[in-house]
Amino acid sequence: MTKKIFRSIFLVAFIVLAACLVLITGALYSYFASEQSDQLAMQARLAAQAVEDEGLDYFDGLATGDLRLTWIAADGSVLYDTDADADLMENHSTREEFTEALSTGHGESSRYSSTLSEETLYQAVLLSDGTVLRASASHRTVFALVFGMLLPLILIMAAAVLLASYLASRLSKRIVGPLNAIDLDDPLSNDVYDELSPMLTRVEQQKEQIASQIEELNRRREEFSAVTDNMSEGLILLDHEGMILSINPSAARIFSAGSDCIGNDILTLDRSPELRALMESADAGRHGETVIERDGAEYQLSASPVLTDGVSRGTVLLAFDVTEKLRAERLRREFTANVSHELKTPLHSIMGAAELLQDGLVKKEDQQRFLGRIRSEAERLVALVDDVIDLSRMDEGESFPRENTDMLQLARDVAGDLAPAAEKRSISINVTGEGGTVRGVRRLLWEIVWNLCDNAVKYGREGGHVDVSVARAGNGGVALCVADDGIGIPAEHRLRVFERFYRVDKSHSRATGGTGLGLSIVKHAAQYHNADIALESEEGRGTKITVTFPAEDAQG
């Protein structure tokens, strides 16, 4: 501001000085030019009177100095000239001052010489004999006058510039000094020019308003941070060039990014073709979605452009962990395919046997065997459908009525039901332990015990044994343990045996007539009761599965 004031004052002073010089020079020049013209007219009249009285004798020995006299005949020829040979001079009949003098008795004119930067004044007087006496004198133009005064003008201008600079600098400092001393943190406490009071009052109001807005922005930022920091989904805000403006902890974990990623391109975090295509779609103003894989997990990326007047100003990028969702979809598809396959096998067997019986191609003594086969396959279908229905109901989170169930008595009931199947393979089922009551869904608890014991009988060693025990667990709950001495489960299959339709030995499973859903039902029923499952197995030496129910569901 000081420089602006200085320049303004200095410029005004310089302009005023220059204008004064121009006006003074113009006025002086005009005044002296007028005086010189009047003097020239007087000299022309005096010379004309002298020529009237003396003729050519007047010019003998006449010293005219800067004044030039020319005597011109009525036809324009020069009779005499004080500065040149009259015989060599051109005819003056066309000269303005000459023609005017012939017509009015007096004539005047001026002519400018650009080469000499001079102006010549002419005054002509008509004599009584019809001749004309002309007087002429030269004087400098304004530019020649200024050029001649150049050095004094430069000195005057230099002195004026120095004085104006000093005054402008001093005045600008005096003006700006109080302004620089204003305390904007407390505008109303300043003692400054009265003209600034409305501005300082406005500054104080603006200061209060800005403080309120900053407080509101901080509150909203804290709310935004609290929300985004606790989101399980990843959130990234990008500008129109794809640079990261904000990233929440979930997104930083997904993309393995640090706090230094702010201001970097999003493609520095992930250069996958899927993300590139997604960002191109967002830049074009279109919403897009894709799925990427990172560290063994699958994430759905959703990019939504932020549009202003139809132009993309940035992008909001959301990342959802869809690993379980996609896995569930794959399992559902596999489940559907497996159910279809499992249903087709007994149905084909039933249809084949029924066709043979219908066409009379079965001997009478074999008919009972075919009918028995149809019945067993139908029972297998019913069991499969029942298992599928149970799993579906548990998947849907259906609520079942709960009641107190004695697990030891339930184990004894199941052992009794499985006794015929165990006798066929010479397997003994031993139930031991103490009474433990679980408050739960009796039918689901029965499914847990039945499927564990049924598998132990099916896959146990012929002539072996199955041990079922019920005991109090260390956490105050109830532990159900089913152990056999059968073929065991290989290590690579132990994590998958609870999946639907998963079989370690498919040929053996077909022979035993299982549906492939037993352990899956055990898993879902246990989860329904918040119970934990532990599996211990060794190939060739048997398998032990323990289901531990929590204390809140167990009673003494």
Image (cartoon, rainbow, N blue to C red):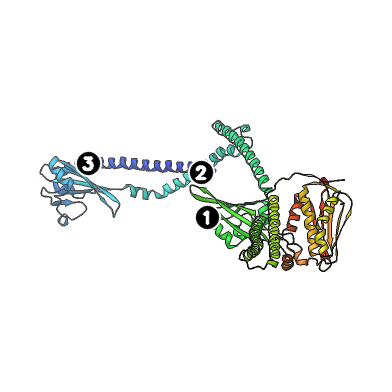
Q: Nearer the viewer, residue 373 or 84?
A: 373
Q: Which residue is mark 1?
A: 283
Whole-angstrom CA distance, mark 1 to mark 2, is 46 Å
Residue drawn where x is 74% and y is 59% of the image: 498
Circle 3/circle 1 CB separation < 8 Å: no
* Dot placed on the residue nearer the N-terminal end, 3 or 1: 3
The residue type indicated by label 2 comes to Lys
Q: Please give the residue where the numbered disc 3 appears in the rendered image.
A: 41
Q: SS at mark 2?
A: helix
Q: Is residue 8 visible?
A: yes
- 318 vs 462, left or right, is left
Q: Is residue 27 shown above or below 518?
A: above
Find residue 4 and name its label. 2
Using the image as rendered, state which of residue 73 and residue 465 is in the foreground.
465
Residue 286 in the figure: left or right of residue 421: left
Which label's residue is closer to the chain start, 1 or 2? 2
Residue 298 falls in image quadrant: bottom right
How far is disc 3 from disc 1 in space, using C-alphas?
90 Å
Left/right placement of residue 135 relative to residue 280 reads: left
Give 223 or 181, whichever is nearer the viewer: 223
Name the residue type under label 3. Answer: Ala
Q: Residues within 10 Å of mark 3 (few under 14, many from 20)?
A: many
